[in-house]
Image (cartoon, coloured by chain):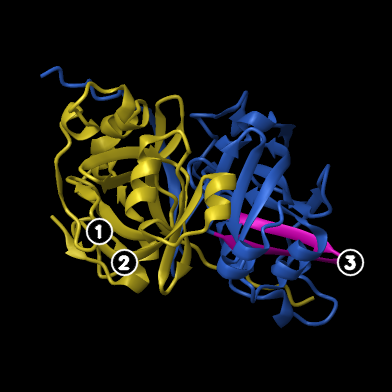
Chain colours: A yellow, B blue
Amino acid sequence: MREPVELAKSYRLLNHGPTVLVSSAHAGQRNVMAAAWSMPVDFDPPKVAVVIDRNTATRALVEGSGSFALNVPTRALAAATLAVGGISARELPAGRDKFDTFGLTTFAASRIDAPLLDGCAAWLECRVLGEPRIQQQYDLFIGEVVAAWADPRLFADGHWRDDPAGAEDRTLHYIAGGRFFSTGEPFDATATPARTI
Amino acid sequence: MREPVELAKSYRLLNHGPTVLVSSAHAGQRNVMAAAWSMPVDFDPPKVAVVIDRNTATRALVEGSGSFALNVPTRALAAATLAVGGISARELPAGRDKFDTFGLTTFAASRIDAPLLDGCAAWLECRVLGEPRIQQQYDLFIGEVVAAWADPRLFADGHWRDDPAGAEDRTLHYIAGGRFFSTGEPFDATATPARTI
């Protein structure tokens, strides 16, 4: 289930720092990898940054196509997130990719070639803003978000819902060694009053 | 309470995507601001990326000193995080800074001039790796982590502890409009087995 997210609000899909799945496609190949290292970098037009290591198969697809998608998985996809993060597409038998290997189904993006993963909480379609120096030096890619989607049961009217159906609907925050934090409870903070000494 | 964190493990202080407080000092001035947009970008030597808007007072201190600290606040500091994120140092009366205005106490960093905030879960001392183009174009700063610290009740032996004393000890993930998620429960995922069709 998915509905479009207003681009100016799309930073909120990543603002809380979830682990994402980077999907990509180019020249008849498609791939998906896990990335704990992504973040928004601008509101409007919305931009994101993500680290895509030079040794990944994803890297060539992103550089070849000039685009990628950030898929925001929920706990229901934690095992799949760990699986696609733990193997390179290059290790798979010829003719196989991570989607069929791990039973992941997809749907078409609206503005880019990368497939979007079914069952995620949200999706950001991104076009690479070429910055050769930082791509080379830090494996760091900047993307402009050109379309965004969310499961309206989890994110609606520009806000994460307080009441996702269950623990399996929480987003993920990777720790290390196959371990994640779930996104926890939302709460309103009241700013500390300034002292008037 | 704080103990040093091995540099090669310091990425784990940010890996789960917490909101941070950026502290800085230069030429007799000090400041602190909130940043939802930071992430690790390398393991060893550890590097981080953080967005520091050109309109912030922090920006001049970071550019002047060539360093900054990322402080990882807990829920006990949510109100202070919101407060320092909601006002610019330039709006304060002459001679006042955000630390005395909001009653925030600090201790000295080991390798940089920025003050570190008492009561946080972790601290990363960073030296700016100058990248003028992305600083100018995206307000994006890359830093090398030159020292790291954590409260051993919350992070010890290179790992976040499963059993922080209470809800107030959880780290924070900013949503928008004064609202945060707490970091939720940790769990181990088991990678989806590959299909052998």
Residue at the spot 28% in from the left edge and 29% down from the top edge: A79
Q: Are marks 1 and 2 in contact (CB under 8 Å)?
A: yes
- Residue B129 picture location, percent across and down: 71, 51
In the image, which residues are magenta?
B20-35
Question: In this picture, is A63 found above or below A100?
Answer: below
Q: Are marks 3 and 2 on the same chain?
A: no
Residue type at mark 1? Ile
Instruction: Judge whether residue A172 can be spotted in this image.
Output: no
- Residue A99 picture location, percent across and down: 20, 35
Mark 2 Cα shell of 10 Å, populated few (<14), some (14-19), many (≥20): some
- Residue A51 picture location, percent across and down: 48, 45
| Residue B23 included in the magenta stretch of the image | yes
Residue type at mark 2? Val
Residue at the spot 29% in from the left edge and 46% down from the top edge: A24
In terms of secondary structure, what is the magenta stretch mainly? Answer: strand
Name which quarter of the figure residue B105 lies in.
Answer: bottom right
**In the depicted view, which residue is nearer to us: A6 or B140?**
B140
Residue A146: give its label: 2
How much space separates mark 3 and mark 1, taking CA atoms? 48 Å
Q: Which residue is mark 1?
A: A112
Residue type at mark 3? Ala
Residue B27: give its label: 3
Looking at the rendered image, the quarter that the N terminus of chain A falls into is bottom left
In the figure, is residue A119 to the left or right of B116? left
